[in-house]
Amino acid sequence: MPLEDQLLVERSKKGDREAFEHLVRLYENKVYTIAYRLMGNHADASDLAQDAFIKIYQALPNFRGDSSFSTWIYHITVNVCRDELRKRQRRPTVSLDEPAGENTPTYEIRSNAPGPEEMLDRSETQAMIQQCLNMLSDDYRTILVMREIQDLAYEEIAEHLGCSLGTVKSRLSRARQALKEKISKQMELTSPPQRLAK
Amino acid sequence: MQCQDVVNHLSAYLDGALDPAQREAVRAHLSRCPQCNTELAELRETLRLLKELPELAPPSDFCNQVMAKIDTLTAPTKEALYKRWLARINRMAKSSWYRTATVAAVVIMTLGITSLWEKDGNQMFPNEPVKPPMVATNEEPSKSSGGTESPAATTPTPSPNAGKPNGANETHNNSPANQSPGSGQNSHHETNAPQSVPRQVENFTPQPSQGMLARSAIIKLDVAEVEGALQAIGQVTKQGNGSMYSDYAGSEQGGTLVIQVASQFFGQTISSLQQLGTVITYLPTEQDLSEEHQQASQRLAQLDQREEELRAQLAKDADAAVEQELAAVQDSLAEQVRVIKKLEQRSAQSLITIQLLYTK
């Protein structure tokens, strides 16, 4: 852990509000990005990234510096998002105002067409990749974010998810294949050759 | 290997996570199967696209919202400090010297207690206050001399003030008889705070605590051009005898960086920064460290004194328990020096978080 982080963490642990604010400013982009990639829309990402920071604040006394501070807070972020995704799986959000029979879950992550405010990614391709991520199962999306965006090693993923290395290997393989297929399909829908080259 | 097997292995192949035999088999297959080669290229491209997804910025009021929520939480500091203290105890309890010391303490206590049983049966809870001296002598068989000082000092009964009045003078007098009482597990002696004992730990002398402050600020600037502003910030940082604390994270549209400057240049640095653009927010903070620093310095003095006592005791006769306590005290001393140095560093250096925004 860099000395600077350590200093800010120590100060935050002692209840120094400003030090924690520095930490939030330093890491808000990364935490928000992870939440956005997992949740697929701005509103959820914003809420859950906030929840993550509050968890981080509360858990700070337990942070002993065994891992780097960044690794630790990204883990918490992923956990907060996974908990939310699990909760939603258990009870799909169905609005009471909706007419009976319209049983499709309403949260945006299932939506393949984000509104303009969801298009946080700069290029169309990037927005499309996120859209494809959104179409994957929660497990696949999570393992892809951990591996490709957080850049975690297989061992770290296994430890975090509480599964074997073999499971990580095979799930990651299937997740990557699934994403590849989604992207290929999307590219076929638009103008394929140029897109691939992009 | 069949095509399907190869496809299943491509992911691990790309990560270099196959064992040598599998990797060779996949490579051999790929050299003669164009279809699987296409699969590999597509998979590689997929991962590239995924990895190239940019870092995103949350809404501009994100941090404020987080802090507002945190402010509504109920006093986390106390709980935090308590948990930290518990964690430290736990860590200490895991160290080997502590285990040895614990075993020794249990043995000594057991000897002490059983020796009470052997006598009058009910000396565990004596009614008359005359008994404690005997208890003390029984409890600490290793003690070299203990006849002259206040008997209450080593009494196991919970009366923390019993030995206090003599405490401060004992070490100054430096008489051998007065250096023995710490050989047991009784830590009450350490609470005698000698304010004026000279400290000679690693030649470390804490700075004066008075007026010790930690200053920091958050400043949000709307600038005409981000790159130019960053260069100017570099200059300002140099002038403030400072350094980059956290590199710029952001784009030409805006981002955040943190600089660290010598505290005496704090005001100067802030006014220079304010000239780099339109100030949207400026949040300075000051935290008074003097009390914390003073407490830490006092604790250091106490430990210092304790160390001297233990050294003198060891010079007289070698005792494993004393050696262990000395090692523990020295550990605590080093830790205390670190704590004080950290406080002094916080006071000497100010952190400034700078948020740049380009709205034109």
Image (tube, grey):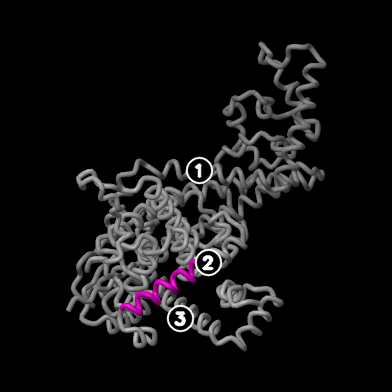
Mark 3 surroundings: few (<14), some (14-19) or many (≥20) residues within 10 A:
some
Which residues make up the magenta segment?
A172-189
- Tag 2, which chain? A
* Residue at figure coordinates x 58%, y 52% from the top left: B198
Amino acid type at circle 2 is Leu
Which is more toward the observer, B81 or A176? A176
As measured in the structure, the alpha-carbon distance from the residue carrying label 2 to the one carrying label 3 is 16 Å
Q: Are marks 2 and 3 on the same chain?
A: no
Q: Which residue is mark 2?
A: A172
The reply to whether dot 1 and dot 2 touch (C-beta < 8 Å) is: no
The reply to whether dot 2 and dot 3 touch (C-beta < 8 Å) is: no
Nearer the observer: mark 1 or 2; the answer is: 2
Q: Position of residue B262 (x, y in %)?
A: 39, 70
- B141 relative to A93 in the view: left or right: right
Is B320 rendered above or below residue B1? above
SS at mark 2 in the image:
helix
Numbered label attached to residue B83: 1
Amino acid type at circle 1 is Lys
Q: Are marks 1 and 2 on the same chain?
A: no
Q: Is residue B279 magenta?
A: no
* Residue at figure coordinates x 66%, y 33% from the top left: B186
Which is more toward the observer, B89 or B320? B89
The reply to whether dot 1 and dot 3 touch (C-beta < 8 Å) is: no
Q: Position of residue A69 (x, y in %)?
A: 49, 61
> Mark 1 or mark 3: which comes first in sequence?
3
SS at mark 3 in the image:
helix
Q: Position of residue B159 (x, y in %)?
A: 59, 25
Q: On the image, which quarter does residue B51 sit in?
A: bottom left
Q: Are marks 1 and 3 on the same chain?
A: yes
As measured in the structure, the alpha-carbon distance from the residue carrying label 1 to the one carrying label 3 is 48 Å
